[in-house]
Amino acid sequence: MVTPAREWREIPGRYNLKGSKCTNCDSIYFPRRDFCPKCRRAGIGKIEEYSVCRTGKVFSFSIVHDAPEFNNGLKPYAVAMVQTDDGVLISAQLVDADLEKIEIGMPVRAVLRKIDADGAAGVIHYGYKFVPDL
C-alpha cells in the first residue's frame, strides 16, 4: 500500500521540477509529457526526462487580494508566470517578495516550500514556489 506521503514524494515534478524533452525537436515540457504534441508520431520513443532550470524571470504576475478560504492566511499574495532560463513557462506562487516591488523581468529562483497539511496525521505537502533571486 502506498501512503499519501510516499505517493506525494514519488511525483518528481512536485519536488524537482522534472519535465520532459523531445529529442526529435528539442521542445521542453513541464509538467512532463509522454509524447510530443508537436512531433506526434515522429516523436514516439524520443521523450526523455529533463530537469527544468530552477532560475528565470517573472513573465507575468498578479496580486491576489480575495483568496479561497484555505488561503485566507496568505492574502494578499502574488502568483506569477515564470519563464525559466531554458524557456519553460511555469505558474507558481511568488513568496518572500515585497508585493510593491514585483515587476516583469525580475529574476527569481525555485524553492521547496510547504503548501499545506491535511488529515489527522498532519501530512505536510510540499511543492515548488519562486523567490526573488537578487
Image (cartoon, grey):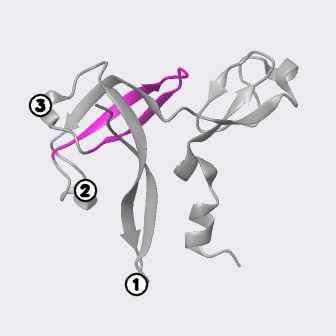
* C-alpha gap between disc 3 and disc 2: 20 Å
Main SS of residues in magenta: strand
- What quarter of the picture does the C terminus occupy? top left
Q: Which residues are magenta?
A: 76-95
Q: Is residue 62 left or right of residue 48?
A: left
Q: Nearer the viewer, mark 3 or mark 2?
A: 3
Q: Which mark is residue 1?
A: none
| Closer to the camera in the image, 17 or 76 | 17
> Which residue occupies the extreme left position in the image?
100
Amino acid tagged 3: Glu
Secondary structure state at the residue bearing disc 2: helix
Give the residue drawn at x 81%, y 18%. Answer: 24
Expressed as whole percent of the image width and height from the top left, the position of residue 74 reads 20, 53
Q: Residue at position x 54%, y 32% from top?
A: 53
Question: Which secondary structure, mark 1?
Answer: loop
Q: Which quadrant holds residue 52?
A: top right
Q: Residue 122: x, y in percent?
A: 40, 78
Quadrant (top left/top right/bottom left/bottom right) for the N terminus: bottom right
Residue on which disc 1 sits: 120
The residue that disc 2 covers is 71
Q: Which residue is mark 3?
A: 100
**Does residue 90 show up magenta in the picture?**
yes
